[in-house]
Amino acid sequence: MATQHSRSAARLMMAPAVILLLGWMLVPLTMTLFFSFKKYLPLRGDSLGNGLDWVGFENYVRFVSASSFWPSVMTTLLIVGGVLVITVVLGIFLAILLDQPMWGQGIVRILVIAPFFVMPTVSALVWKNLFMDPGNGFLAHVYRFFGATPVEWLSQASLQSIIMIVSWQWLPFATLILLTAIQSLDSEQLEAAEMDGAPIPSRFIYIVLPHLARAITIVILIQTIFLLSIFAEIFVTTGGAFGTRTLTYLIYQRVLESQNVGLGSAGGVYAIILANIVAIFLMRIVGKNLDA
Amino acid sequence: MARAVTTQRKTINTIIAWTIGLLIFFPILWIIILSFKAEGDAIKTPIAVLTSGWTLENYGVVQERSDYAKHFFNSVILALGSTILGLIIAVPAAWSMAFVPSKRTKDILLWMLSTKMLPAVGVLYPMYLIFIELGLLDTRIGLVVVLMLINLPIIVWMLYTYFREIPGEILEASRMDGASLREEILYVLTPMAIPGMASTVLLNVILAWNEAFWTLNLTAAKAAPLTAFIASYSSPEGLFYAKLSAASTMAIAPILIMGWFSQKQLVRGLTFGAVK
């Protein structure tokens, strides 16, 4: 159907997007890769103009052997894992709940998804001050009302607090996607199972959960990619203190705060590899869907 | 649902769902409430807060002290600018992939998606250097381009899924009738694509408005949008709950409203068409 003429026109129309994204991907990536093999401390006078010393894999070895590395990996895993468990479990529950007949369904759905639209710096700062502040925060008032001592959330339970804040932001995303998926479930199947006397738990395990499997996988993969690089929530609340320094934040500190560009770039390469491992799985699912 | 639902069950559902919904929404509600309170009242116990008087003064103070309007304007420029620029580049690309697909179309689409997964922090310093070198640090134009680039894969992807739903026969018919490529796009395709394009715009304005890595790291005083402006409240002096709330309310209100209109598109856009 497509003529030679329209084929070349199509290629031409695709060119700007392809070239821009190629440049956006290759130029900074090549530079990061280049810096990661160099000694590059801008504050001590190193600059591209003067030429940088080649140090081989030293930055890669130093980044991994630094005492801050494994704790940051642990923190990253705990935050990503914690948020995933909370958002997926609650998301499934909320999706099923919101799919039930009720009054004011549309309004409830709006209430539930609202946190997703709050910009990260606002939600982090509001949680930090209005809710988690040990002096005047909402939670402190509630604790005092019941005669308990207010918790210093962001220093005593810093990791849990950040997991909480991030879960609040991402629960709407999980809920919305799982709700969309659940609405495509054939209700006759469920009714048939109910008529045959299947109890609610088995109906959930054998019908609802398998139907949601793909949506759950997608939620997990997409959230993982975004959660691996959360930044503002930590930047605004603890600044990486109290055991909340993630891999992303560690790299940020190496590059911009201590200005060790070589070391930070090596860390960046690790982060890119990590994200790509997750991305490969996501792309497979999305790719399959394209064929369908 | 085909079967009759008892009123009792519906009532229970309603109560549980509303309770949870209000609990999740509560932090936002609390921000809005505190924004209308005097500073001295805003730090009191929740009951004292609710029974204290209401005031509009915070909204005025935030504007006077911090030049709120400038940051708001920056946010608008960044969100709209990056979306419009993205559309100009993405529409032709998505059009050609949807209507003149080749063997490589799928690979190109997936590759575009993969650029979205590059962790920003991995290329922070190179971007920083490039921005300094080109004189783009703390400029709106520099950020418009960066925000456009990070959202371009989503724009192309969403437009592609919408375009693919437009029947190709209509386009062929217009071609048979002698319409040029330009006319075909302008008079046949565009009117049919407007709903899809509107949702794409909506989602991208939301994403650009809330972007909080590049906007925090590549701006200072001049080009800082609301994300960076709000972050500057993190080291406060004295009483500031009510003012923080007022600033936050104004920063999230436009997007909350837009977000409510874009629930469905959000799913399609953020799952790259994998869940519809």
Image: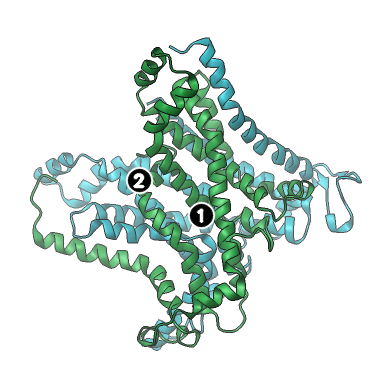
The residue shown at (23%, 65%) is B16
Mark-to-mark CA distance, 1 and 2: 26 Å
Q: Can residue A66 be seen in this view?
A: no
Q: In the image shown, does A175 or B25 lie closer to the viewer?
A: B25
Chain A: give its colour.
Answer: cyan
Of all chains, the one bearing label 1 is A
Q: Which amino acid, mark 2?
A: Lys
Q: Which amino acid, mark 1?
A: Val
Q: In the image shown, does A135 or A66 lie closer to the viewer?
A: A135
Q: Name the residue under label 2.
A: B264
Q: In the image shown, does A260 or A64 lie closer to the viewer?
A: A260
Q: Name the residue under label 1.
A: A80
- Estimate the x, y position of residue B144 in percent, counting from the top left: 61, 48
- Estimate the x, y position of residue A5 in percent, counting from the top left: 53, 12
Few, some or many residues within 10 Å of mark 1 (<14, 14–19, 20+): many
Q: What element carries label 2?
A: helix
Q: In this view, does A113 lie above or below A11?
A: below
Few, some or many residues within 10 Å of mark 2 (<14, 14–19, 20+): some
Q: Decide if residue B57 is on the left or right side of residue B70.
A: left
Chain B: give its colour.
Answer: green
The residue shown at (49%, 30%) is B94
- Estimate the x, y position of residue B267 in percent, counting from the top left: 39, 45
Q: Quadrant of residue A11?
A: top right
Q: In the image shown, does A94 or A89 lie closer to the viewer?
A: A94
Q: Is mark 1 on a helix, strand or loop?
A: helix
Image quadrant occupied by the N terminus of chain A: top left
